[in-house]
Amino acid sequence: MKPEQAQTSMRAKLEEELKEIHFSKSVEVLNRTHPRSLPAKLRALWNYEIELPLIPLGAGFAVLLVIVLATQFEEHSDPGDLAGDMPRADRQLVEAGGNTYWKEDFEKAVKRVEGKDQS
Amino acid sequence: MKVKIKVKHLFALVTVLFASFVLLQVFVMPSVQVALAKKHFEQGAPNGKRELIRAIDAASGDDKWALIRRYMIENGSDLGATRFEVIAGDGTFESGTVTSLPGTPRWTGEEKLKYLNAYVEGGPVDGYMARAAKQLAYEYLLLDRNEDAIRALERMEQKLSSPYVNQKSELKFARAKIYADVDKPEAAERLLNELNDRPNRQDTYLTDKIAKLKTRVAEQRDPTASSVSGTIKKSDGTRMSGIGVYLRSSRDIYHSLIDSEPYQTMTDAEGRFAFKGVAPGSYVIYIGLNFEQLDGWTRPVNRDEEWIDVRRGERLTHDITLQRLIQLRAPVDQQVITGETVQFEWEPVEGAAYYRLNGTFPVENGSVGFQIKDHIEDSAIELPLETLYGVATGYSYKKFGDKELPDPSTLLGFAEPSSRFSWSVEAYDANGKLLTRSNGYRLNEQTMGHLPFFYLKARTLTEADRLLLEGRMDEALSAYKADYARDEQDHHSLRMIVKLFGIHELGQKETFDVASLTYLEKLASVDNSGSALATLIAHYGEVGNWPLVDRYYGMLEEARQGKVESYTQALYGTLLLKQGRVREGEAQLRQAQENDSSNRFIGSYLASVIYLSGDLVKAEALARQYPERSYYDQANPDWSKLVHDLAEESRDANGDAYLSQLRDALRVGFSGDQTRVAEWRAKSEHAAMEAFVLALSMAD
């Protein structure tokens, strides 16, 4: 027996058996469990409950997010032609030993030579 | 792990995700990008400028103008004086923060033209408009598009409505200034006259600027107007365009550069500049540069070396060539020296006849500089530590409790083992003209080179040194005396005794007492630096002990190998005049005068020339050639006028008798004795002679 036939016969059997019992909204219930019309079928699908594997899906979503973000910010990270030479903000000049240096560079240089002395 | 979800909820979830993505793209991302662009630009990140340009291009309306205003106009430079990061004068380098956003990337001329033009055309008409127009004009001037510059200013002046009357005046003034710079004095004058008729005249600052430019323009229209022009380049041949050039009068150089000084211009694309219609007077050229332009380079000039004396009708040329900084080789990078000598070594400079070695040590809030050795012929020299210990160093003051005392570590000088010293060199040609130096702006890895620091740790501190470092000066002096009494070879203690006595006497304003003189003479006999000798010459000159003056000067000449510093040489010259040894004095003064660019000894030299030759014409020519320089608005004598008046007076009087009277008078002047001068003046009948002798007696 095909499943549809089985369903139909089952429904006939059920109707027969429940003839004496009166559900309120019995028609509605029957329509929902066994829809016949297209809108009814769609509504069934709409409310269909699916089970999703959380890990593969989450991983996929994360990958997608990374790709999107990467393309968004790609333009910010391409190498500049003038890197290195560009002055940086918050720089201060310092006068030391008669020369004028950028404070940051000077302190780095002093640290470097002091490191060399100790090694 | 699985989750159960209804299809409709899944659908809703996907829809929400998609919608928020779209929302992010359309509304949030652009403002995030603008914010990021701003941040990157302000930090000077490599791509900051490109991002900001993209943001400006993408923005429209008020957002666009706000971006241009904030990042271009507020940070931009116009025709004013204070737009450069460094103002280099004759031996001075003054750096200031001139931009509201230091360290941000620079806009190119092209970018500025594009966006400033857009702003001027479509931006909101408010106070920023005049600024934008002036900056636009400046960009045009940099490209030698003078007509466009003038047009931009004129159009903006017409565009601005009456509430902006001050800005309109500023724009008109800027236009007049350009006309004056491009040698169209008629057009400039017309605009300046219009400005004089302006309704709102309370703006005294602008009124002052207008008056000064008017004087200059009037001068320019004079057919006998003088001019100063030249080229600014680097020694590798690069022409420097867009450099600020300021011809500053001797009355102005004692203060920082201000906007109202009349001779301000900048170099064109070929590095050329020109000032037309310069009023006769003495000037020094200052130049304005950005850090990148000066990084690794220097303007090789010492104070007083580049005076420009403009006389009526003269067309003077004055070129400026920046030179590369000298790289130091040893001792560098905080090398610790424990041996008995220090080997100084640096990169040789082409064409250098000799080098001068200088030292500095750090003090609170700065450093003390001094000369270690002059007239070094090679690009290396080995100096015994004793020589360094004997170097005459200045000293600063330091607080000990509630007392200000001379900073002990500066008193110890090179003898302080924990001080970090630094050194530098200057290269000179055979005429004593500075070629280049090692000190300057070193702002990137290539130009930074080695750090010029070193330590001298050969000696250990004595008990007396420790007392000194604790600020217990009197105890330290006694300890040094005791040390020296024990060991006559203890030169360090001897030097410290002399230094401490020197400070004491400076405080008491007394001359040397016998005790300190003894120490000083002992030091002079062992110290090869000669610094004690100069003090002794000055002292014995003051008390009139001529044989000792001669003796110590002879020793000094020997120590300096015939090259005595001009101040001491001139002092010796005036002491010779005082004794009536005028011929010898004249010879010393002539040499000192040649080696000193400030011409501070010219008065005594002129007097000796007049005394010997009686040739007032020659003296006047000398006075004109070597005018004594004035500073801080202090009025130094105008010797050429004084001599000119003498010549006139001698013509009116009987020449020979006048000259013999003048010789007598000069002898009085040579004495420097103010009572004698006053007595003589009371009897004298010659006003010009009195004026000259008075000036001579006061000369230093």
Image: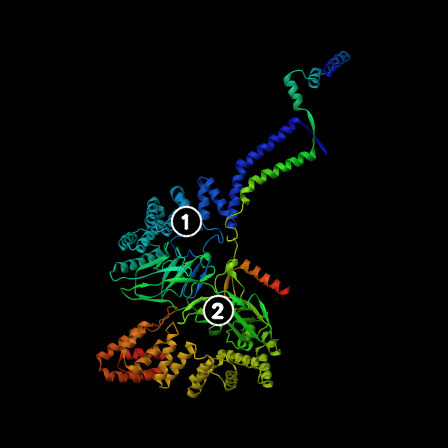
Q: Is residue B688 shown left or right of residue B509?
A: left
Q: Please tell me whether mark 2 sits on a helix, a strand or a loop.
A: strand
- Residue B518, disc: none
Confirm whether residue B310 shows in the render. Answer: yes
Q: Nearer the viewer, residue B21 or A73?
A: A73
> Quick one: which residue is furthest to the right in this view?
A17
Q: Chain of mark 1?
A: B
Pointer 2: residues within 10 angstroms few (<14), some, or many (20+)?
Answer: many
Q: Amino acid at mark 1?
A: Gly
Q: Chain of mark 2?
A: B
Q: Nearer the viewer, residue B684 or A72?
A: A72
Q: Which residue is mark 2?
A: B425
Q: Nearer the viewer, residue A63 or B77?
A: A63
Confirm whether residue B681 shows in the render. Answer: no
Q: Please tell me whether mark 1 sits on a helix, a strand or a loop.
A: helix
Q: Which residue is mark 1?
A: B109
